[in-house]
Image: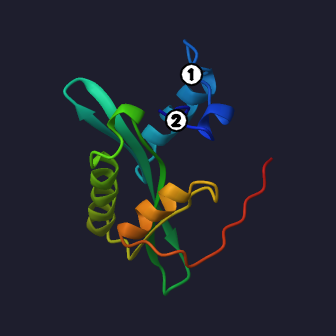
Amino acid sequence: MLADDSLGSTRERYEQPLPESYLNAFQAIAADANNELVVACLGKDVVGVQQITFTPYITHQGGWRATIEGVRTSSSERGKGIGTALIRWAIRRAKERGCHLVQLTTDKQREDAHRFYEQLGFTATHEGMKMKL
């Protein structure tokens, strides 16, 4: 699913076997209590995924925030509420963990994603910056 869109198709790989870097990342995430991978299934089919990371921080009087990343829904299942269910689950999980903020970033080219997240109550409050290394 990571490679199943116009942006992901240029930066992700999906050959079998997958590159070892994916396995290494999965193992590091699985070993970290502040990272969770979430998989949505219909029967035996994986139809959605996301990662949620919990981070302590010093601003806002200290506390925890949750960052949602890597949200993907199978192209054959888009528009059926799976993405909404994933995000709502992540928000509930963030509350359970005592977070007072949940955040995410989305590529500026993903206008549909911007509308989707706004409909779920997210607001574009900051301008994010990244540097490729």
Instruction: Tell me the crowding category of disc 1: few under 14, some 14 to 19, or many 20 or more residues within 10 angstroms, Cα based.
Output: few
Tell me: 115 left or right of 79. right
Quadrant of residue 128 within the rendered picture: bottom right
Q: Nearer the viewer, residue 87 or 54?
A: 87
Determine contact: label 1, label 2, CB under 8 Å. yes
Give the residue type that dot 1 points to.
Tyr
In the rendered view, tell whether residue 46 sits above or below residue 30.
Answer: above
Element marked by disc 1:
loop
Q: What colour scheme has been applied to the protein in the rendered image?
A: rainbow
Which residue carries the number 1 mark? Answer: 14
Query: Measured from the top left, where is residue 130 in percent x and y?
Result: 73, 59
Tell me: 32 left or right of 22. left
Q: Residue furthest bottom?
A: 61
Residue at 63% from the left image edge and 55% from the top image edge: 109
Residue at 57% from the left image edge and 29% from the top image edge: 22
Q: Nearer the viewer, residue 70 or 80?
A: 80
Q: Residue furthest left?
A: 43
Q: Residue furthest top?
A: 16
Give the residue type that dot 2 points to.
Leu
Residue at 72% from the left image edge and 65% from the top image edge: 129
Sequence order check: which comes first, mark 1 or mark 2? 2
Query: Measured from the top left, where is residue 79 in percent x and y?
Result: 33, 46
Instruction: Tell me the crowding category of disc 2: few under 14, some 14 to 19, or many 20 or more residues within 10 angstroms, Cα based.
Output: some
Which residue carries the number 2 mark? Answer: 2
In the rendered view, tell whether residue 123 sits above or below residue 133.
Answer: below
Q: Gap between marks 1 and 2, in whole Å?
A: 9 Å
Quadrant of residue 91 within the rendered picture: bottom left
Total number of numbered discs in the rendering? 2
Residue at 78% from the left image edge and 49% from the top image edge: 132
In the rendered view, tell whether residue 45 sits above or below residue 49.
Answer: above
